[in-house]
Every structure is written in C-alpha cells, then in structure tokens.
Image (cartoon, rainbow, N blue to C red):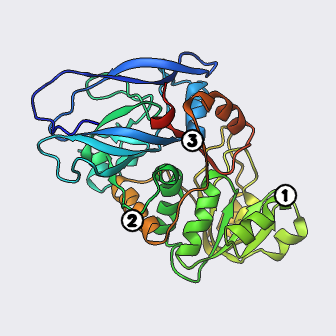
Amino acid sequence: MSTSISTSSPGTERKAFGWAARDADGGLSPFSFHVRANGEEDITLKILYCGICHTDLHIITNDWGNASYPVVPGHEITGIVTAVGQNVQKFKIGDKAGVGYMVGSCNDCGNCKEGYENYCPNVIPTSNGIQQNGKTTYGGFADILVVNEAFAVNLPENMPLDKTGPLLCAGVTVYTPMRRFGLNEPGKHLGVVGLGGLGHLAVKFGKALGLKVTVISTSSSKKKEAIERLGADSFLVSSDNDQMKAAMGTLDGIIDTVSAHHAITPLILLLKTYGKLVLVGGPNKPLELMAYSVIQGGKIVAGSLIGGIRDTQEMVNFAAEHNIAADVEVVPMDYVNTAFERLAKGDVRYRFVVDVANSLT
C-alpha cells in the first residue's frame, strides 16, 4: 500500500484493474484501464468493498440507453486512503473513506452552492459518467479510485466497511427525505413501501429516529422479518383491501422504495391530512395519480434522489452513532455475474457487496 503524499505536479496516470461490461448483455469480465494522477485536491482510495445497486444493473444492460462501454460499475465504495494531494484537508493517509453515486459537479450552480450537488445539471456519476477532462468514470468494481476529496466522506472507525458501502447510496436515499420532509420527528408514523435494499434501511433509520414504522408490502411473507428482526412496529399487506381500509389516514409520511410499476393512490389514502408520499424508487413506466386523492387532505407527492455530500456525511455519522449497517451478502468478484442475475430476480437479502480487495483477479 502506497503511503506517499501526492503533489500538485501533473504526474502520470496510474494503471488500474477491475471488471467491466462490454455490451448490453451485461456480462462482466476482467478489464485493465488507467486512472488520473492524484491532484492537489484529490485522494487515492484503495477499494476494499463495493455494493451492488439496482442502478448498476440498469446501466450495464443499457436499460436507460446511456451506457458508454466498457462500463466498470459500482458506486457504494469503501476503502482506505493511500495518497492525498497537497491541498487535501479532510483526509490523511490510512483513513477510512467512502464514495457514493457522484464524484463531481459544476460547483457553481445554485444547487451546488446549497449543498445539493446530487441535483446539479452537470453532476458526474461515479460510474458511466464523463469527467471534466472528457474521460469516462470507472466505478468501484476496481482496485483503486482517484477522487476529489469534496466527493468523499469520512467513515468513523467503528463502521464495518463491508456493511457501510450500501449506506452511501441506499442509506442516504432514504435518510435524506426523512430529514428534508420533516418525517424525522420522534413519534411520527412512517410507512415504508417495499422491504428490499432501500426499505430495510428505511426501517432501521426510522426506528433510530424514534418513529413508529409500518412496512407496506404486497404479501405477508416478510412480516416476521420486518417486525421481529428489523424492528418495525407493524406490517400492512397492500393487496388486502380490509387492512388498507382500516389503515386509511394513519400515516404522517411514506417512503416508497419500489422500482416496479405499482398503484400509488391506495398509498396516498393511507396518509393523514398534509401527509407526504416520497418516491425514491424509479419505475420505468408512468405512475397514475388521481388528483382528488391529493386535493382531499392537502397531501403531497414528492420525489427524492440520493443526497448531497453534506447529507451523506450526516447520514454516515448518524449511522455510526446508532450502529446502523446494511444487511449484506458478501461475494467475490468472480461471482458478480451471478449476483446480477439474482438481483434481477429479487433474490438477495438485502444487498450484495463485492469483496474487491480479497478477490479481484
């Protein structure tokens, strides 16, 4: 592991190694590439672990039509700082650090100035993005990452790196709207739709914030898991009309994590007056909304996309204080193609994490 401090000299690119998808079939295989030299405000991260997000699956199979192959996926990255630029203030060599969905933005627009880099029109994704030098960004399925320190977060010593990576995407995705929409006040009643990678963390953060949490799912198969292991207060089967009718007007807010097409009007009816339904999943097909369902009761349907760097650091610190970590299945790099197949079928509890450092060959 390198312990030299990088300087402001242009330097040379460094060789890197990872796994990449070459086409829309989505199959990953070994891939050699280069990363930029560590600049004055950069850190170099030796990647130890990287979570697998459903967004990675969309990108490698070109579901959204924006894949720029070869694609090295991964944006739930944890590791150790091995080099720092001369102007770096937040990190020193040997620190634990994490990188989430983005590695850059314009730093000049209103969103960036307010700490909402995630909504910058020119945000640079960690994977499958275009850097300011015109080169493609390669993600966390690789041995190293060079990133501006402003887009990395400090990870407290007590946080397990394998279970922390998913917090940098899934965790901040559910934590930020709780804070932004006032759903973090102790005693409020929060509904969580879907109990997957996002949903299980929404339950954990909700309980740590002192909320009453109800999990909403299409079947009762996850009821025991939600209540006995994750600590939810109650469980609601959305396909049971009697249960849904009995729960009408009981929730202060709902975090909807479902990415598949589904009906949202029945969810809106669960809200109290001025209640909020926040969408954090991304269905590919338009959702239907009956206007009167929101007009009656002054209800709000909103959306939220990950969080800014400030939000992410706040979330990480909160998670460390309350011992919140993702439930993960750690897999070697040569298992990632199988992991993506299982992810597509929903066969994971609740997040795959690649043991990059110990299995990258």
Residue drawn at (29%, 36%) of the image: 1
316, above or below 206, in the image: above
> Residue flagged by tag 1: what amino acid is it?
Ser
Q: Which residue is mark 2?
A: 317
Residue 242 lies left or right of residue 74; in this view the side is right
Q: Which residue is mark 3?
A: 53
Q: Is residue 45 visible?
A: yes
Residue 28 on image: x %, y %:
57, 22
- How many labels sit on residues? 3
> Residue flagged by tag 2: what amino acid is it?
Asn
Residue 128 on image: x %, y %:
44, 28
Q: CA distance from mark 3 to mark 2?
A: 22 Å
Q: CA distance from mark 3 to mark 1?
A: 23 Å
* Residue 23 found in image quarter: top right
Residue drawn at (33%, 58%) of the image: 310
For residue 219, the mark is: 1
Residue 40 on image: x %, y %:
14, 38
In the foreground, 224 or 55: 224
Residue drawn at (70%, 54%) of the image: 289
Residue 90 on image: x %, y %:
22, 54
Viewer-nearest of discs 2 and 1: 2
Q: Are marks 3 and 1 in contact (CB under 8 Å)?
A: no
169, above or below 134, in the image: below
Q: Is residue 123 visible?
A: no
Label 2 residue SS: helix
Residue 114 lies left or right of residue 342; in this view the side is left
In the foreground, 340 or 69: 340
Residue 243 lies left or right of residue 4; in this view the side is right
Q: CA distance from mark 2 to mark 1?
A: 34 Å
> Residue flagged by tag 3: what amino acid is it?
Cys
Q: Residue furthest bottom?
A: 187
Mark 2 crowd level (few <14, some 14–19, many ≥20, 10 Å Cα):
some
